[in-house]
Image (cartoon, rainbow, N blue to C red):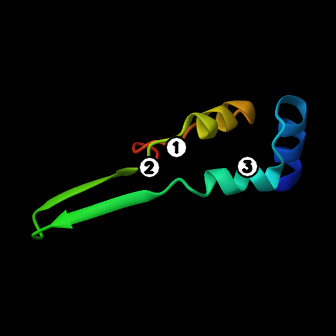
Amino acid sequence: MLYRVLRMRLKAKSPYSPNRMLEVVRRIQYHQVTLHRKQSTKGLTTLTPEQKDLFDTVNLPKPSKIAL
């Protein structure tokens, strides 16, 4: 089902295939680091312009730290 929706949205506006889009989006990672059991930080990989464009093309919200 997801593949069909992606294919319809991408076909109308983008040269990417659903498989290519999933490959590009798969590179987004969540990182969490703890130092000395006290200090911790977490965040997402910075989105590339290509990733941002793909999220806009398929009309999906971009991943954010708040949404996690």
Specify whether 20 is left or right of 40: right
Relative depth, front residue between 30 and 46: 46
Dot in front, 2 or 1 = 2
Residue 39 drawn above or below residue 64: below
- Name the spot of residue 43 as percent of width and height, x first: 35, 50
Q: Measuring 83% from the left and 38% from the top, which residue is drawn there?
A: 10
Which mark is first along the chain, 3 or 2? 3
**Do tag 2 and tag 1 residues touch (Cβ < 8 Å)?**
no
How far apart are the two marked residues, 3 and 1, measured between alpha carbons?
A: 15 Å
Q: Measuring 73% from the left and 49% from the top, which residue is drawn there?
A: 21
Q: Which residue is mark 2?
A: 45
Q: Which residue is mark 3?
A: 21
Query: Quarter-wise, where is residue 12 in the image?
Result: top right
Q: Secondary structure at mark 1?
A: loop
Mark carried by residue 10: none
Dot 1 amino acid type = Pro
Specify whether 6 is left or right of 34: right
Specify whether 25 is left or right of 38: right
Q: Looking at the figure, which quarter contains the N terminus?
A: bottom right
Dot 3 amino acid type = Met
Q: Which residue is mark 1?
A: 63
